[in-house]
Image (cartoon, grey):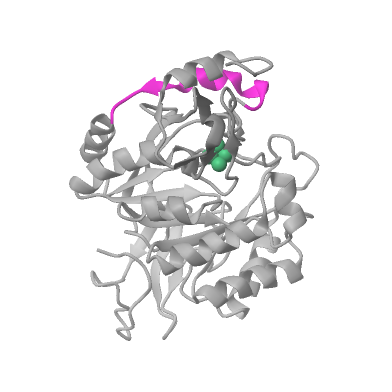
Amino acid sequence: MQGEKSVTEIARVLDALTQEAELVQQMDSGEVRCLACAQRCLVRPGRRGICQVRFNRDGKLYAPWGYVAGLQADPVEKKPFYHFLPGSIAMTFGMLGCNFHCGYCQNWLTSQAARDPACDEAVYQIRKISPAQIVDYGRRMGARVLASSYNEPLITSEWAVEIFKQAVAAGMKCVMVSNGYATPEVLKYLRPWLAGYKIDLKSMQDQNYRRLGGVLKNVLDTIQQAHKLGLWVEVVTLLVPGFNDSNAELWEMASFLRGVSQKIPWHITAFHQDYHMLEADNTPAASLLRAAEIGSEAGLYYVYAGNLPGRVDEYETTFCHHCQAALIKRRGFYVMENRITPEGACPQCGMQAAGVWG
Ligand code: SF4
């Protein structure tokens, strides 16, 4: 495109798979303000936003459309959602690109496509597809959930909504698996179709978020707003040794979530060396357990330790917050036993568990 130093092959392919964006504010002299995420890029004609996949052509903002780079029937627990139709299949689609550049990204091949030449082979994952085909595939797989995931879904919200509309009409519930770098505008845009929102809380240190390409406050605001809008929110913290694993920081995270709602499930998951972050150790089970205990001490009802199945004691199980009965036992992404009633209550004391159950 005009004004670009070079346009990679992957960008050329992606640029053809676009449609005029709806999450945009038209400015003077052909500039556009993108509203799809909290970067709020001001994009001049011929230029791209930070994510590289939304761009200004002749004074109009274009957004990704009409393809997937991954489409898979996953357990909903893999997203992870533990309180959202447990044991269900989530038909999950992903695209390319991200608004962050986390050095430890575990999906970097697709998330950093168009930003990092090392990801150019992701071009071979692109498949043109229609919303009806995605929903039909989900139906044939028995999916009750339709998820936008793998890369950052906010940057492709218009395409997601097109799919969500058909999924909702087919009786599915829709979720996003996101870094939570949202704007109030995009949350309002998604709200009619979205039922669940998984948000990463990567750190409580603003300087850490700036290393990843964002600002802490915008993520905290998203957690509060999504909860206030009535979305079912679950929060994930990838625990990276030396980055975000001090007791003080974990206490701050848990206390923040506790302040929004005791009922928000908090998943603390294990990091493994990947992409540019090869110096930090893989997260040991003992650190996950330490973090989970801090979450429980802070007063959160539902705290989980993930990515190390079978090594995290009771932190794969959902307990009734009232009588402590085990409600749902899991191993990794799989539900081994579900004793919760169809209405979402504890079979022992009758207390309602927080979540989306039936
Ligand atoms: S989605 Fe975010 S990063 Fe991409 S252009 Fe819009 S505001 Fe910028």
Q: Position of residue 117 (x, y in %)?
A: 66, 20
Res. 219 image quadrant: bottom right
User: In front here: 314 or 262?
Assistant: 262
User: In front here: 53 or 330?
Assistant: 53
Q: Is residue 224 left or right of 22 when viewed as pictured?
A: right
Count of marks overlaid on the render = 0
Q: Is residue 337 visible?
A: yes
Q: Is residue 311 visible?
A: no
Q: Residue at x 57, y 18 (%)?
A: 121
Q: Position of residue 252 (x, y in %)?
A: 68, 71
Res. 200 image quadrant: bottom right
Q: Position of residue 291 (x, y in %)?
A: 66, 67
In the image, is residue 313 above or below residue 118?
below
User: In front here: 125 or 230?
Assistant: 230
On the rendering, which quadrant does ligand 1 occupy?
top right
Q: Position of residue 140 (x, y in %)?
A: 21, 36
Q: Residue at x 54, y 36 (%)?
A: 28
In the image, is residue 148 above or below residue 49?
below
Q: Residue at x 38, y 39 (%)?
A: 158
Instruction: Tell me the magenta residue range.
Output: 115-130
Quarter of the image with the N terminus is top right
